[in-house]
Amino acid sequence: MRSKAPTFPTPVLLTSSEEVARICEKLQNEPFVTIDTEFVRERTYWPELCLVQLAGTEDVVLIDTLAPGIDLAPLGVLLAKPDCTKVFHAARQDLEIFLHIFDRLPVSVFDTQVAAMVAGFGDQVGYDSLVGAITGRSIDKAHRFSDWSARPLSAAQLAYAAADVTHLRTVYAALRKQLAEQDRLHWADSEQAILTEEKTFRPDPRRLWEKLKARTSNRRMLGILREVTAWREQEAQNADIPRQRVIRDESLLEIAAVHPDTVEALSRIRGVTRGFAEGRMGKGLLEAIRIAQELPESELPKAPSKSDRPRPSAALVALLRVLLAAKCEEHKVAPRLVASSDDLDLIALGETDVGALKGWRRELFGLDAQALVRGEIALAVVNGLVELQHVSEAVV
């Protein structure tokens, strides 16, 4: 599968709106464009975009998004062009950035990390590992943790940034060819569908409390946690600061448990300063607590339910896990892409509304998994490999 990467021209740094418009108009006519971004996020809620790397068939350009007065609108037009495939590796953060800037997601996206999992390169393979496997070349990691907001950028930084999109052209071509030969392009399309949904990148603030995993079934406490977590998210967005800089998770959990209703009580919460409690944010937080306290019982969130379903046989789940590993080894696809641990539990219990029993996963694994649960097939070791046998053929 390894192929020799071609030689690419020296990347060009674009610092004017005219240059951006000219290259984006040209790239719209390409069958695909490889894209990467460099950004910083340590001090802000929204990623601060510092550089956009683009590569077409001939061009390799770097857009200095911090150049004074630069207009990125033509880049938005390019990203919205349906006839030009936008190729990323591990696209989620890049897509989140573009959604924030242009208020819409790029279309016709191809994520080489997802494609590599489908093609059999393992779970969430890194870009440098994938480039090495396909091109035989190594990626210089020296500038991975550069401060991309500092100017001027060095020649070494620009070369590092350009490498992310130059090699990606070869990786994309090789992966697309392999997936076509394996008849798995539709698998990759199915896995990348989530990248076309705005809700993937804009979670509901009133659902974020669930991530804090409060160890309680008290619905009033959970209602307070929901309101104060949503309040924090809005404050972080408005101020463009990391949510933990507004108030930390541990403090929100304590607030939900103690439900302070005065400035004095709020200031006694661990991690809450007197100045915070007395200020605008403290007043907003107390208001969110008050709202939650006054909600009728019917509007409070339900505690995450402990499943009422019976526990599946641990031995049967272990057999399903072996079957999954064997099928994925046979078909050279990452196991985590086919079935989750919860999927295996549900299949062991005879459930049918399971992701692993739908679409291409059903053909690759699901049908055999159900047959194993029904006792119609058994697992055997033949010449050092796990194989399936019908029960009538299995050695007892």
Image (cartoon, grey):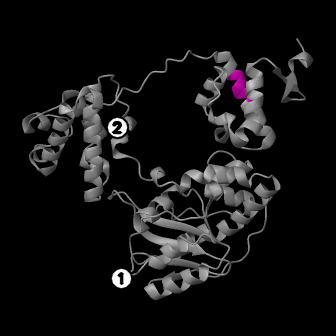
Start-end of magenta stretch: 318-323
Q: Is residue 43 magenta?
A: no
Residue at 73 percent of width and 55 percent of height = 185
129 vs 120, nearest the viewer: 120
In depth, the one of 369 and 335 nearer the eye is 369
Q: The residue tagged with tag 1: helix, strand or loop?
A: loop
Comparing labels 1 and 2, the label whose residue is closer to the camera:
2
- Residue 136 seen in the figure: no
Give the image location of residue 89, x and y in percent. 60, 59
In the rendered image, residue 174, in percent from the top left (x then y), is placed at 75, 62
Q: Nearer the viewer, residue 16 or 295?
A: 295
Q: Give above or below for 310 relative to 8.
A: above
Q: CA distance from mark 1 to mark 2?
A: 39 Å
Q: Amino acid at mark 1?
A: Gly
Point 72% across, 36% down: residue: 362
- Whether residue 67 is visible, yes or no, is yes
Task: Kindly state the secondary structure of the residue where label 2 is placed.
Answer: helix
87 horizontally vs 386: left or right:
left
| Amino acid type of the residue tagged 2 in the rendering | Trp
Q: Residues within 10 Å of mark 1 (few under 14, many from 20)?
A: few
Q: Residue 87 appears at what percent x and percent y?
A: 62, 65
Specify the quadrant of the image occupied by residue 149: bottom left
The quadrant of the image that shows the C terminus is top right
Mark on residue 209?
Answer: 2
Give whichever of discs 1 and 2 has the lower sequence position: 1
* Mark number displayed over residue 69: 1
Q: Nearer the viewer, residue 8 or 301?
A: 301
